Image (cartoon, rainbow, N blue to C red):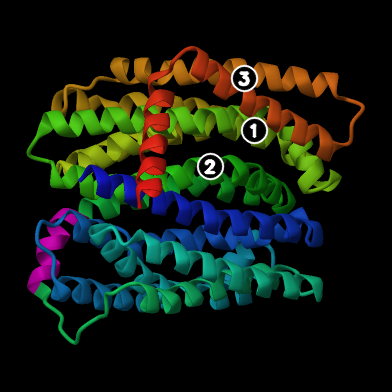
Amino acid sequence: MKQKVAGGLFWKLLENGGSQGVQFVIAIILARLLTPAEYGVVGIIMIFIIIANVFVQSGFSTALVQKRQADEVDFSSVCYFELAVALALYGLLYLAAPGIADWYDICELKAIVRVLSVVLFPGAVISVQTAYVSRRMEFRGLFLSTLAASLIAGAVSIFMAYRGYGVWAMVWQQIVYYLALMAVLFFTVSWRPVMRCSLQRLREMFAFGWKLLCASLLDTIFNNLYGLFIGKIYNEELLGSYNRGEQFPKLIATNLGAAIQAVLLPAFAASQENTEKVCQMVRRAIRLSAFVTLPMLLGMFAVADNLVLALLGEQWLVCVPFLRIMCISYCFWPIHITNLQAINAMGRSDIFLKLELVKKALSLAALALGMCFSVYGMVMLKAMQDFLCTFVNAAPNRKLLGYSIFHQWMDVMPSALLSAVMCAGVMAAGLLLGGLTPWLRLLVQIGCGMILYVLLAWALRMESFCYLAGVVRERLHQGSGE
């Protein structure tokens, strides 16, 4: 199991990093060709698409991974059911498109909603394909598929943006990505749907999955409430700046979170009867994810202004405050993700749903209070709410696993303190290098931050650093032996 988890995590991180790395480069090129207002228009529509995708993709896919014995009938039944749900939701979005355009007073939204909503259909199939990948840990095929889809979609979007298609370049980027990913997965993943559908199997999985669906729906709606309100109360240009500022830290946190979720959920589930073993795995996951994630997020906080100037240009400087606030907010994700996956693996989706209800009450309170301040105050309160939610997510595992939030923060604290020292050093280096160009200053800051963090971790003999170094040495030894 240890080798399967390590190998799966390697390919999952490579898949996320490769795909998101390509998409990151494409986003930088598109940012040079498009305006914040155009990004904001697509950002509004993507909120509705993301929420609709929750109905299509959530609940059943996790149930497929968690189920002890899942065969071809289970996977095919879920696939056909999710396609039916996608059809119903597409019809709803098609009819709602004029109302959405009127609400935001952007007439172009009507056509964009009706075209972009087609991604729900390949999304339904992809969710089953990725569930099959997670269960069998065939992450190498997923890596190749997402990389290929990202390259194809990126080429299309850049060409269209260069030719002056504006927001439609990003619309077709999403459509081509989903279609290409679904098509390539059929060649790289061994699962194929069969002509069988069992309502009984669906009912059995629904008993577990409906709670996760409700929890995911609540989480998605509340995570996108800020975008909905910023787009309505302010304007699409400020929404585009908020989305762009969130994109950089989210790229780091969610990729690691997705890797943890995809790889550790089946590993946790396989050991769910051994509480002590699950606790050890959860503790290791929190330590390692904090050790890797926190220096990247706090390092990005330190170089935010140079990062935006070098990559996006002066027109995007307005997103720097958003970027820094969201770097702090996403620092709490290692605790969030790992605790929730442990609860899912233990088969306690009822607790998962209760946690989401509590967190959404906190989110509503933070949003209502934030609307009394500026848009920056609103986002700062969101970061504070994310911090409070770490205590909510960790509370059940004190009883389930004997792993309290106090012990979790003690495991995270060495990486947090080391990252804070590194952040201060990188910011000081930026001040000393004020005469350099943004690109050169950014490169020097990143290099100084990496060297400082690794040297401090080595000098202090940090447990996570020694563990990762041991894994690397073992891999290199195995490679040389072969």
Can the viewer see residue 272? yes
Q: Is residue 114 above or below residue 449?
A: below
Residue 34 coordinates in the image, percent (x, y): 78, 61
Q: Is residue 23 left or right of residue 190?
A: right
Residue 110 coordinates in the image, percent (x, y): 61, 74
Q: Secondary structure at mark 3?
A: helix
Q: Which residues are magenta?
A: 200-209
Q: Which residue is mark 2?
A: 252
Q: Which residue is mark 1?
A: 300
In reply to whether residue 386 is colored magenta, the answer given is no
Q: Is residue 203 above or below residue 477?
A: below
Instruction: Specify the quadrant of the image occupied by residue 426.
Output: top right
Instruction: Specify the quadrant of the image occupied by residue 317.
Output: top right
Instruction: Specify the quadrant of the image occupied by residue 432.
Output: top right
Q: How busy is the neighbourhood of tag 2: few (under 14 within 10 Å), some, or many (20 plus)?
A: many
Viewer-side label of 1, 3: 3
Q: Residue at x 62, y 77 (%)?
A: 111
Q: Which residue is mark 3?
A: 422
Residue 113 coordinates in the image, percent (x, y): 56, 72
Q: Answer yes or no: do the residues labelled 1 and 2 have beta carbons within 8 Å?
A: yes
Residue situated in front as seen by the camera: 327 or 192: 192
Looking at the magenta stretch, what is its main secondary structure? Answer: helix
Q: Residue at x 81, y 32 (%)?
A: 441
Residue 219 coordinates in the image, percent (x, y): 39, 46
Q: Earlier in the sequence, mark 1 or mark 3?
A: 1
Q: Residue at x 55, y 77 (%)?
A: 114
Q: CA distance from mark 1 to mark 2?
A: 10 Å
Q: Residue at x 48, y 12 (%)?
A: 460
Q: CA distance from mark 1 to mark 3?
A: 11 Å
Viewer-side label of 3, 2: 3
